[in-house]
């Protein structure tokens, strides 16, 4: 069975890069442009991993993380999130981790960084 990834990223360039990289590695990938769209999909479907930008219109990554923490708190199979951000590391990284982020990666990133982060979050991904 394919692992399922949800990508929430408003930049077409970054979104396409992530979708193509994980699709080539056998993942079933869906992508959206906002936190609101991501939350709606997570409520309706099961995903093994979430990669989300922080700064997006119509629902930021921070709002998405807060909502996920509230909505999925009682479920044992919470979607592990990887956060991608530009210029908000330092204290921001600690804050994102408190909200539930498994990994925080700063833009610009190498796709290999995301692949390695996914392997840390999902042991079945080799």
Image: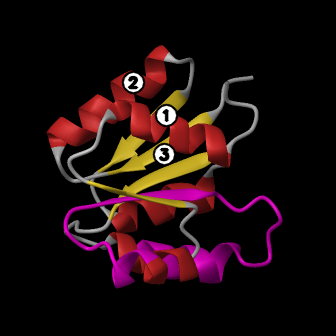
SS of the residue under disc 2: helix
The picture places residue 40, in percent across and down from the top left corner, at 49, 62
The residue that mark 3 highlights is: 6
Does residue 5 appear to the left or right of 107 in the view shown? Answer: right
84 inside magenta stretch: yes
Q: Is residue 55 visible?
A: yes
Magenta-tinted stretch: 64-93
The mark nearer the N terminus, 1 or 3, is: 3
Q: CA distance from mark 2 to mark 3?
A: 13 Å
The picture places residue 9, in percent across and down from the top left corner, at 29, 52
User: In this orientation, which residue lies closer to the viewer: 19 or 108?
Assistant: 108
Q: CA distance from mark 1 to mark 2?
A: 8 Å
The picture places residue 77, in percent across and down from the top left corner, at 78, 58
Residue at screen point 60% across, 62% down = 43
The picture places residue 65, in percent across and down from the top left corner, at 49, 74
- The quadrant where residue 118 appears: top right
Does residue 85 appear to the left or right of 98 in the view shown? Answer: left
Q: CA distance from mark 1 to mark 3?
A: 14 Å
SS of the residue under disc 1: helix
The mark nearer the N terminus, 1 or 2, is: 2
Mark drawn on residue 115: 1
Query: Marks 2 and 3: which is nearer the front?
Result: 2
Do the residues under discs 1 and 2 have CB atoms within 8 angstroms?
A: yes
The mark nearer the N terminus, 2 or 3, is: 3
Quadrant (top left/top right/bottom left/bottom right) for the C terminus: top right
The residue that mark 2 highlights is: 21
């Amino acid at each position: 069975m394919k692992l399922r990834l949800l990508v929430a990223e408003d930049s077409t360039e970054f979104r396409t890069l992530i979708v193509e990289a994980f699709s080539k590695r056998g993942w079933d990938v869906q992508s959206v442009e906002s936190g609101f769209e991501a939350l709606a999909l997570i409520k309706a479907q099961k995903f093994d991993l979430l990669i989300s930008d922080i700064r997006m219109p119509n629902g930021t990554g921070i709002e998405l993380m807060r909502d996920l923490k509230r909505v999925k708190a009682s479920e044992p199979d919470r979607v592990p999130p990887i956060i991608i951000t530009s210029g908000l590391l330092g204290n921001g990284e600690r804050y994102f981790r408190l909200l539930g982020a498994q990994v925080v990666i700063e833009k610009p990133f190498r796709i290999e960084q995301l692949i390695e982060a996914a392997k840390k979050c999902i042991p079945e991904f080799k």
